[in-house]
Image: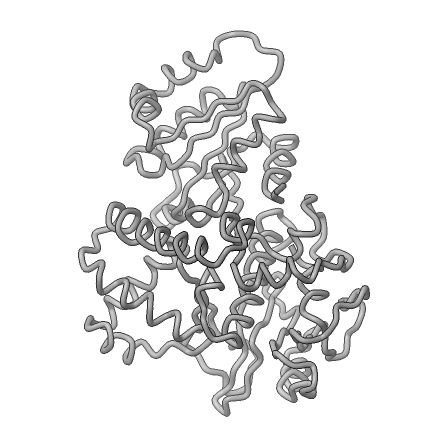
Amino acid sequence: MERLYQNIISWHFDRYQQMVFLAGPRQVGKTTVSKVLNTFNDQFYYLNWDIDKDRALILAGQTKVAHTINLDLLQKRRPIIVFDEIHKYPNWKNFLKGFFDAYHEKIYILVTGSSRLDIFREGGDSLMGRYFVYRMHPITVAECVRTNVIHQEISKPTLIDDQIFKNLLNFGGFPAPFLKKNTQFSNNWKRLRRQQLFREDIRDLTSIQEISQLEILAGLLKDHTGQLLNLSNISQQVGVSINTTKRWLDTLETFYYCFLIRPYNKAVIRSIIKEPKVYLWDWSDVIELGARCENFVAAHLLKATHCWTDLGLGEYGLYFVRDKDKREVDFLITKNNIPWCLVEVKNSKNKSISEHLYRFKLQLNVPHAFQVVFDAEPVDKDCFEIFDPIIVPVQTFLSQLV
């Protein structure tokens, strides 16, 4: 199926000279999207660090790469080169900096990777100004119905086929199991992906030796989806210190196993300060239906905030709201650090609107407040035109995002 991201990359290359960094989980479709660009440009080159001959070419240096792909010849159109998994090369930043500085006026450069390509910025960024990051997510409701590049946050609702929606909820948004729609295939795919993630990626790219205990932590997070993380209890169950648990959580976030959502405490009276909530990138791994539904919405909201930010529409953040009296709303989206949209997730439309939704909408002066439900028929109505708290079918709401 066509993905949103191939259109984003083409859109970027039409406008900017900076490299594209396409970052995202293993098997989310980065390589497939990269190779599809060959259909738009016959001058297309793909180098994968994991392939011996490609690795040897990269190690030979920027000039050798440029000569091999004929950058010293006059060409009809500017070619595209993809460097896949190059972050595994210890000197990858200097290589890309030199290649970009020498050849960016002659070629489009796409860099992909299955661990976060932007984490090195914490220690200074030698590539500053030379790249834009686009974070690739699994398939979502909106991507099933449209793949055009957006120029504003919210689109008009587009109804999704009910069976496609059920497949997305049950098999997840990673392309292979979603398109296969087979439980046995999905189980085998997830088992192999976990092995590759823990036994190859994390083991090879980090200093963590206790992989079995890290897998225990990952299993515990599945059972804590949507809950406040008590690091002390989890550390005891895993058998490591709290500091080690924090470091391992960072690793699991870096490799796109899970993501943490933190409490929003500005202008929230008696807000909690520290405890985050955890969700999985692959929501189909969550067994309990209520928790999976909440994780499903969380993943859609994270994708929306990332995509809106990456496309330059503003700075968007995803939080939850909770005070010390245990009043809570599942999610809050901020736009340029200002509360913009509250979202509460319920399985049933028969429950009245949460009083906490009313409370925090008033307290934070939030324009939009939705109680998103899974058992209501979708309607062809823009819910963002309404500024009072309202119950919205999940398919309608999610189809208006990304």
Q: Residue furthest bottom?
A: 325
Q: Count all numbered tags in the image, as a single digit.
A: 0
Toward which corner of the image does residue 277 lie, by quadrant?
A: bottom left
Q: Is residue 111 left or right of residue 105?
A: left
Q: In this view, does 239 lie above or below 144?
A: below
The x and y percentages for residue 26 are 41, 47
Which residue is painted at 52% across and 48% down in the image?
175
Q: In this view, does 165 lie to the left or right of 82?
A: right
Q: Report the front residue among 283 and 24.
A: 283
- Please provide percent x and percent y for residue 36: 57, 32
The picture places residue 47, in percent across and down from the top left corner, at: 41, 27
Q: Quadrant location of the C terminus?
A: bottom right
On the image, the x and y values in percent for residue 73 come to 51, 7
- Quarter-wise, where is residue 257 in the image? bottom left
Q: In this view, does 83 lie to the left or right of 89?
A: right
Which of 16/252 is in front? 252
Residue drawn 35% across and 51% down?
192
Residue 124 in which image quadrant: top left
For the N terminus, give its image quadrant: top right
